[in-house]
Image: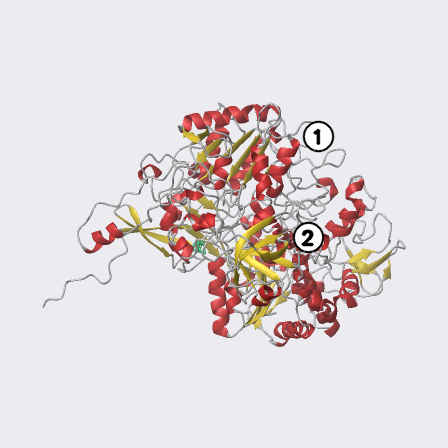
Amino acid sequence: MREPTLNTSPSPGDEAKTTTCYMCACRCGIKVWLADGRIRYIQGNPAHPVNQGVLCAKGSAGIMQHYSPARLNKPLLRVGERGRGEFREIEWDEALQLATDWLAPIRARNPDELAFFTGRDQSQALTGWWAQQFGTINYAAHGGFCSVNMAAGGLYTLGGSFWEFGEPDWEHTRYLMLWGVAEDHDSNPIKLGLGKLKARGAKIVAVNPVRSGYGAIADEWIGIRPGTDGLFAFALIHELLRMDRIDLEYLVRYANAHWLVIRAPGAADDGLFARDADGHVLCWDGRAATRADAIDISPVVVGECTLPDGRVAVPVFQLLAERYLDPQYAPDAVSERCGIPADTIRRIARELAAAAFDSKLSLPVAWTDSWGREHAEMTGRPVSMHAMRGISAHSNGFHTCRALHVLQMLLGAIDTPGSFRYQPPYPKPIPLPNRPGKARRPDGTLDAGPLGYVHGPEDLLVDADGQPRRIDHAFSWAYPLAAHGMMHTVIRNAHAGNAPGAGGQRIDTLMMFMANMSWNSAMNTGETIAWLTDKDADDNYRIPRIIYADAYASEMVAYADLVLPDTTYLERFDAISLLDRPIADADGVADAIRHPLFDPATQAEGRDVRGFQSVLLDLGARLGLPGMVHADGSPKYRDYADYIVRHERAPGIGLLAGWRGVDGEAHGKGAPNPEQLQRYIEHGGFWREELPESARYYKMANRDYLRWAQGFGFAASDAPIVLQLYSETLQKFRLAAQGHGPVQPPDAHRQRVATYFDPLPIWYEPFEHDQTSREAYPLNAVTQRPMFMYHAWGSQNAWLRQIATRNVLYLHPDTGAKHAVADGDWIEVGSHHGRITVQAKFASNVQPDTVWSWNAIGKRKRAWALAKDAPESNQGFLLNHLISDVTPRGDYANADPVTGQAAWFDLRVSIRKADATGTSQPQLPALAFAEADERPLRYGARLRNAQFHSKAAPEQPRRKPRP
Ligand code: SF4
């Protein structure tokens, strides 16, 4: 019998196109294989610096994201009541004319009446600039409810941060501590790095109430109680100080350990740095005060000194030692609160010190520091740390992030071989020079970008009475360092401000992009929905107009008056820009693009969508916004691709750094190059330049690095960046609260500012832990984002839904026994804010005082084109219904008092067996989106036939149900 002729290694498709994945925030390089004009297969791009060929489940399921039945296909105008989901399709001209008609009077009257907030988009370099040109201070992206504590804690301390702006030295570290890290950020680089550590036998310690994902392969799991990470860090600092296992030379050379602080309680200069007549910070050399930045000094770091003018001053290190050697931070004192045995804390401190100081790592690389000293080698401290939302999404998260950085500094473990490393363009000056815009120029534009970094009370956005000017109250006395804005407060404040006689800020139009604020991105989801739909006595919506742009039929679409349909990530141009969230790594600088693999019109019958960034530029031109029109009023940019290539933020600096200059030979700075996007496409969609070997460590004080960074426009000068153990910026706010200076908080905020603006990191109970009864709500409740899904997007994806279509509440079996709950029981979960009914599942990978669930799998009925009986909406749930957007006292947002970061993980709950079973509660009415197609989404059968048999006609995408 003859064997059939089979092609056992068929080509994945007719052609492969390289672009950037957008199935999560990681921005991996991908190769998209096409066959007969349809996606056949997605694989990782081995040449790409981010993922080096690695692809995760989400990335490969991008096929199903592109062909999702939930795609929006036409602009939509609301026809029914807001929130029902009843729309009629309109043409783009009508949609853009409407938006122009709504926005033009606002800009003429008061640009702040436009609140423009974006979600997890990757184009903030454009959207922030657009808001500045419009002239509104009311702009932000999603960082305020994500991890601004991480960003601000790092930037005000190190001039860099964890998140995806820094990384462990995967090649050399011998001890890695992961603090509160789930699986959703920097995903593939961390997986690759952990693989290297495992192969080398380096120790990985995961500090997290839940052992999942990366923690599952850690050598040691520290099941910490939520909100106590700072206390644990202080106990480690206490032990290191007590054992005298710190790197004092590093602290004096690269940090401000020796800087003198005025000690004059009650005086206007108390707690500020002592400076000479020229403003240089002073230190004490044992005999006299001298410049702290002088070369080769041996300053005193303990004790007290008297300055020539008679004032008393102490070195920063003295203050630090006084604070953290206090017995309240001893391991025995914090053990019970943290849920970590004191012996474990002591052992971890010894292990950290041993890894840092006893390993004698040094790299034979000569380098020159900022002061011109030449070093024959780079001394290593192979202890690294990485942290993320688990530590930062608490009301004490800012100080916890600072605490981790102080711990790293004491070990000499910032940008030394083996430690945490900056990724260019970081480090940046401390604080960053760009302050938030406050005033409007004659042409109506804001005098600076709406977001930035305050240096002191004078930079706040408050009125003459000290009240917030922004709709979200960012940069007010309530949340002064809210560097990423506070998206989680916008809808409440917009509703309240528009109430008669409320006296708050009024807005006219709320414009949002990719932000599911009526569902999983909202705290207090139920009331948020009510605020979006509430009307005044004249039957007008309290929030008069809502414009929303999204690619998919999310829950938020139902609350828009005008819906602008965005493309999928495979139909658009994007810039992964150094002006936004770069994809650089510690050894090189890089950026990337996306480019359209398809014309959207070919992707479904009647599909007529546009990239939101191009729409913004079109809208800006119709509004005549400066920067978007020529002198004759004609549009300056054809679309976003044109903007990416031709827009210059400063002379020679644009969104992309590669292939600049008229001949395309310049990198970093250079004139716009019309062929730039083509060069990116030819080079796999990305550009990367390697750092000189001598510039790869000690970046904060490495002359070669700082000059290289200056050449790229990352830094204004090559001056060293001094790490701030002690933050004078915070002390300036505290002094204002104590009655000093021309800008002071209203009396209602004084105590709060004085308490939380401590220049050295502090720990305090998360507000909800402190303000609710431990007996009534004995458990902590947290969420994690699943490794296989990203925000709300994953639950529309036919392949990812095969992994999970619903979530459950996980609890430790001991916790179940304690509360008379059995595995699989339906339980009622209550908080000070609300109650939900969910199904419980036992898992022993959680510390017993904590319950947890996957985030954003629960869906509103009929949203995302899911069937009406989809498990996501019938058995899945949101913990958000339990999370209040204000503290239990109701006095402030449920947020960090320094940065305004949403305190998602402060939640305390009770559990008890429920009477009803089978369906999660609450169940909100189904959206009036068109009946979802319940047939399973099949993909590939025709392609397979075409591959192995004859060339069949390409499978046609089914028309998606219209909302
Ligand atoms: S980690 Fe994120 S960006 Fe990378 S392949 Fe997976 S989904 Fe795509």
Q: Which mark is residue 768?
A: 2
Color encoding of the figure: secondary structure
Please tell me in which quadrant of the rendered image residue 105 appears: top right
Report x, y in % for residue 100.
50, 26
Residue at horizontal 48 percent and vertical 69 percent from the top: 196
Residue at image mark 1: 503
Please tell me in which quadrant of the rendered image residue 763 appears: bottom right
Which residue is nearer to you in this view: 315 or 206?
Answer: 206
Report x, y in % for residue 358.
63, 76
Report x, y in % for residue 238.
73, 68
Which part of the image, by quadrant, shows the C terminus? Answer: top left
Which residue is nearer to you in this view: 261 or 548?
Answer: 548
Give, as a three-letter code, the residue at label 1: Gly
Q: CA distance from mark 2 to mark 1?
A: 28 Å
Please tell me in which quadrant of the rendered image residue 506 appears: top right
Which part of the image, by quadrant, shows the N terminus? Answer: bottom left
Mark 1 surroundings: few (<14), some (14-19) or many (≥20) residues within 10 A: few
Which residue is nearer to you in this view: 199 or 224?
Answer: 224
Looking at the image, residue 171 lies above or below residue 147: below
